[in-house]
Amino acid sequence: MKISHEVPVSLLEESKQFNDYDYALVHLFESLPEKDYYQFYRDSVKAGRHVLLDNSLFELGEAFDSKKFAFWISRLEPTEYVIPDVWCDAKGTMDSASEWLNGPGLAVPKSCQTIGVVQGKTYEEIVDCYKFFASRADKVAFSFGNPYYQEICPHPNKHMALALGRIQLMSQLLNDKIIFVNKPHHLLGCALPIEFFFYRDFKFSWIDTIDTSSPIVHGMIGTKYEPAGLLNKQEFKMAEMMDSVIDEGLFPILEHNINLFRSYVKGVNRPSK
């Protein structure tokens, strides 16, 4: 699995040392100075790095305006982008995707691959949405915070329920032979970092990319991962902390968190400088 951690603008260049690819939020292209945010990702594209552009649903509560999104995709030319979706709404997401693929999406470069996010409130809705994207998108993604995870895994700790629930859902989809194992998949965010240990060395090789700001956000507030990561997630969004300047005294905590997270995913820490 390729890992990307969202970071504040001050760490964008440094992030190339620990991120396997670069993950961008489209709404920040308009709210941050282009030379600081957009230009970083444009330079990454030019340098041949893998760049994933998200539609900012999690940050905005709804997907970024479709016409503006098409504009930024065409300008940036990312490796892949997330098709506009609707939170926890399978039909709304499929309708939105159909509208995109037959409308603004037609105007973006064909070289940019598509990612469809599975949404839904029930297993049946999730299966329908998954099958829809498996036949239409280049990659299929699962979000970290769908309340359905808490229904199938009612752990008293909300964040543990979300983490274990996503594992349980994807395991059931795999066992039911719903998963297209030859198609790449993406995991959007995480509730608790320990979740990713359970994909390692098992039958989840179809998970290609993951993104989460968890090691960075928690490091920025001085929270150091324990051996099992965290028991509770701080409800901060990196998009709200993009202008932060990190105290140098916190860098060892950031590095510790990044390395421990990588060990969950890959079984090894990143190489030392």
Image (cartoon, rainbow, N blue to C red):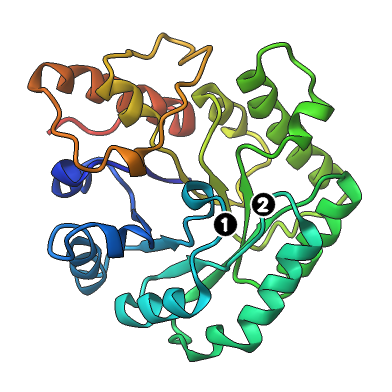
Looking at the picture, tell me which residue is in the foreground, 32 or 3: 32
248 vs 219, left or right, is: left
- Can residue 5 be seen here? The reply is no
Residue drawn at x 75%, y 68% is 94
Q: Position of residue 110 (x, y in %)?
A: 48, 86
Q: Is residue 61 above or below residue 49?
A: above
Q: Return the disc, 1 or 2, that comes first in the chain's sequence.
A: 1
> For the residue carrying disc 2, how many other residues have a C-alpha within 10 Å: few (<14), some (14-19), or many (20+)?
many
Which percent across, then down, holds residue 135? 74, 73
Residue at coordinates 66% horizontally, 58% vertically from top-left?
A: 86
Instruction: Classify residue 137 as left or right of residue 240.
Output: right
Q: Which mark is residue 62?
A: 1
- Which of 272/237 is in front? 237
Element at badge 2? Answer: loop
Q: Residue at x 18, y 68 (%)?
A: 43
> What residue appears at the point 70 percent right and 55 percent down from the top-left corner?
118
